[in-house]
Image (cartoon, helix red, strand yellow):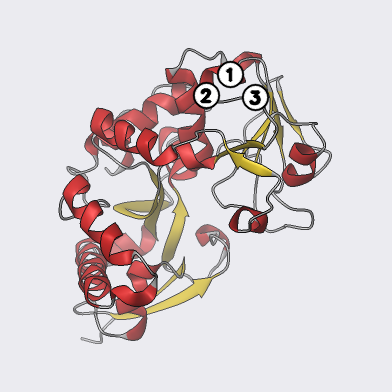
């Protein structure tokens, strides 16, 4: 029986390097991984069998009964969101509660990351419906991303008439939510700063309270591919797990990739244990349930989505 050839598209995350180089292989399958600059639209590409997809859009689809994708509890992108709130250097804003009634720019309305970031405000009692949300690209000229989703936008959400960087700089926005930092944040003369003065401390407190690092993107297969090869999801999850394990092992050996990576890795192990980005439905049950609750409470999902529906 011929070995099936499976083609996936993902961004080139560090923990995929062992798979990309062939150091780790998926058993019983000829796996091809194509790297992308932006998250692929798996359903729109006939040549793909699966790939990276937004956790939010996938969960919303499942809630609507859309089963065209079979999601795997392999969260290829995770990240704390406290670091993702930027304000101007001269701003007197210093905490999530200070954003009550503000005008906030963000890179996408239904996005997984921005949903988690809005949850920080909601946890502080901030009324999300009283905020003026403006959706647009971080920098002028950025394209290739669905920023609005398929559902009608709430009345307080509009398309921005400028980039988020420009709007924050000229005072049109009080803050912006962005998963990726503008280049000037890595210079000594940035016009912007993080809202959380010590976002690392805030993120440690968040982990101590919740027990997880928020999941943003997952691996998914087209339903017909999963149905044709019912053993494939387990094989892929095992391969991605092994790639992550080998990646961490190599990082611990080759620590000179940044000046203080060794200290980071030691701190990470003490705080999170062996794995800060676990795969599997059980290991992510609490995080998935919290995310589904936010989708409903923020008015993005029209009905509550049960966590067990997501990776059925």
In terms of image quadrants, where is residue 204? top left
Q: Quadrant of the N terminus?
A: bottom left
Q: Which residue is mark 1?
A: 98
Q: Are circles 1 and 2 on residues that touch, CB within 8 Å?
A: yes
Q: CA distance from mark 1 to mark 2?
A: 5 Å
Q: Residues within 10 Å of mark 3 (few under 14, many from 20)?
A: few
Q: CA distance from mark 3 to mark 2?
A: 10 Å
Q: Residues within 10 Å of mark 2 (few under 14, many from 20)?
A: few
Q: Residues within 10 Å of mark 1 (few under 14, many from 20)?
A: some
Tell me the SS state at disc 1: helix
Residue 304 drawn above or below residue 19:
above
In terms of image quadrants, where is residue 225? bottom left
- x and y percentages locating residue 125 in the rendered image: 48, 12
Residue at (84, 39) in percent of width and height: 161
- x and y percentages locating residue 68 in the rendered image: 44, 51
Residue at (63, 58) in percent of width and height: 187
Residue at (67, 56) in percent of width and height: 184
Q: Which residue is mark 3?
A: 92
Tell me the SS state at disc 3: loop
Q: Which residue is mark 2?
A: 95
């Amino acid at each position: 029986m011929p070995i099936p050839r499976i083609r996936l598209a993902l961004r080139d995350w560090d923990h995929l390097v062992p798979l990309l180089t062939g150091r780790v292989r998926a058993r019983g399958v000829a796996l091809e991984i194509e790297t992308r600059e932006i998250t692929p639209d798996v359903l729109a590409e006939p040549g793909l069998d699966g790939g990276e997809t937004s956790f939010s859009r996938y969960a919303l689809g499942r809630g609507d009964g859309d089963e065209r994708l079979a999601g795997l509890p392999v969260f290829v992108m995770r990240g704390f969101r406290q670091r993702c709130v930027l304000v101007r250097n001269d701003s007197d804003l210093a905490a999530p509660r200070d954003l009550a009634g503000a005008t906030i720019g963000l890179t996408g309305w239904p996005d997984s990351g921005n949903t988690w970031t809005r949850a920080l405000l909601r946890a502080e009692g901030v009324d999300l419906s009283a905020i003026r949300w403006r959706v647009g690209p971080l920098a002028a000229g950025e394209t290739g991303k669905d920023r609005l989703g398929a559902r009608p936008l709430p009345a307080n959400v509009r398309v921005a008439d400028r980039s988020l960087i420009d709007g924050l700089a000229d005072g049109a926005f009080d803050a912006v939510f962005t998963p990726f930092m503008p280049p000037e944040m890595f210079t000594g003369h940035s016009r912007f700063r993080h809202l959380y003065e010590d976002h690392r401390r805030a993120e440690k407190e968040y982990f101590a309270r919740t027990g997880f690092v928020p999941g943003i993107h997952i691996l998914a297969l087209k339903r017909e591919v999963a149905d044709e090869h019912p053993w494939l999801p387990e094989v892929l999850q095992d391969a991605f797990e092994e790639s992550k394990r080998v990646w961490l092992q190599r990082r611990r050996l080759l620590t000179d990739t940044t000046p203080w990576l060794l200290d980071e890795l030691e701190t990470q192990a003490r705080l999170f244990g062996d794995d800060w980005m676990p795969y599997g439905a059980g290991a992510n049950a609490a995080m998935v349930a919290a995310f589904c609750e936010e989708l409903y409470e923020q008015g993005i999902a029209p009905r509550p989505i049960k966590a067990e529906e997501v990776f059925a």
